[in-house]
Image (cartoon, rainbow, N blue to C red):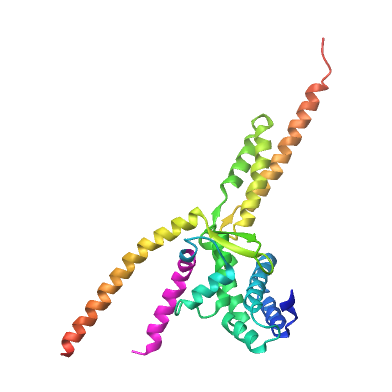
Amino acid sequence: MEPGRARNAVSQLRKGTLEYCVLALLRDGQRYGFELVRTLSEADGLLISEGTIYPLLSRLRRDHLVSTSWQESEAGPPRRYYQLTDAGKRALADFSDEWARFRNAVDALVTTQGEQDDEHAH
Amino acid sequence: MNMHTDPLVDDYLRRLDAAASALPAHRRDELVSQIRDHLQEALRQGPAGDKAAVRNVLERLGPPEEIAAAATESAPPGQLAAGFSQVNGLAIASVLLAVLWFAGIGAVLALVFGYRARREIENSAGSQTGSGLATAGIILGWIGITILVAGVILISFRPLKH
């Protein structure tokens, strides 16, 4: 099977989980946009174009999962900070449970399948 | 404001603004200001006029057309309205109260609920509908108030018999 197929599947997964990665980054406190974006882009493979995270942040705000506030910075102009709302905390908790279940199910299938293939090969 | 003098940055922001033209004005302004802030943060540390640094930051951001597309697809106005929209409850309450009138109190509440419903619908980015209902509630509410005022005037100026 062509490798592009697997990559496409993972890219779809990434798209679907990115907003929860953003919410998770805000779990321990507020962050400003640039800080969020750079942390995400340094987590391997999570972000291709840094700029696309900003529309996502706006959508999370419109969905009332995060709220924003302007705060002074030590140097330069004020920064727009993002923080979790109660609804955002609930959404993140729900996702964490679902994700753990999903990840375990996929892991169980993918790994046992791999082991069986190995056995056949030997 | 010192970063804005860089022609590469200016050009990038112009392209972004043009690519985001399908968005409502306030969403486009928000997007451009987010990216402008990002550029300012990213370029603050480096020396001014460092072309390579600017190019690197812009490359990491990605093509402005891609960012604008992400913003447009994150809430397609028609699709959202068709998919998950629900009628604002206050809009319904507004029309009901206006019709029931309740000695004028209904009309006053219809106005309060109607205006609040319209604000909520406006802020819902397409996930709520019913602004027509809310407007109907507001109009009926004002009619109700007019009737109330007219009634009070009529009663107080009624010529006393006997």
Q: Report the magenta stretch's main SS.
A: helix
Left or right of A66 in this view: B34: right
Instruction: Determine the residue positioned at 44% across, 75% down.
Output: A14
Q: Position of residue A33 (x, y in %)?
A: 58, 69
Left or right side of A31 for B114: right
Residue situated in front as seen by the camera: B102 or B122: B122
**Front-lying residue, A22 or A74:** A74
In the image, A57 versus A8, the foreground residue is A57
Residue at 59% across / 45% down in the picture?
B90
List x then y, in percent, for residue A100: 33, 65
Does the magenta portion include B43?
Answer: no
- In the image, residue A92 above or below residue A122: above
**Which stretch appears magenta?**
A1-23
Quadrant in the rendering for residue A122: bottom left
Quarter the N terminus of chain A occupies: bottom left
Residue B15 image position (x, y, % from top left): 68, 81
Q: Residue at x 50, y 63 (%)?
A: A26
**Is residue A15 inside the magenta stretch?**
yes
User: Residue A63 vs residue B33: left or right?
Assistant: left
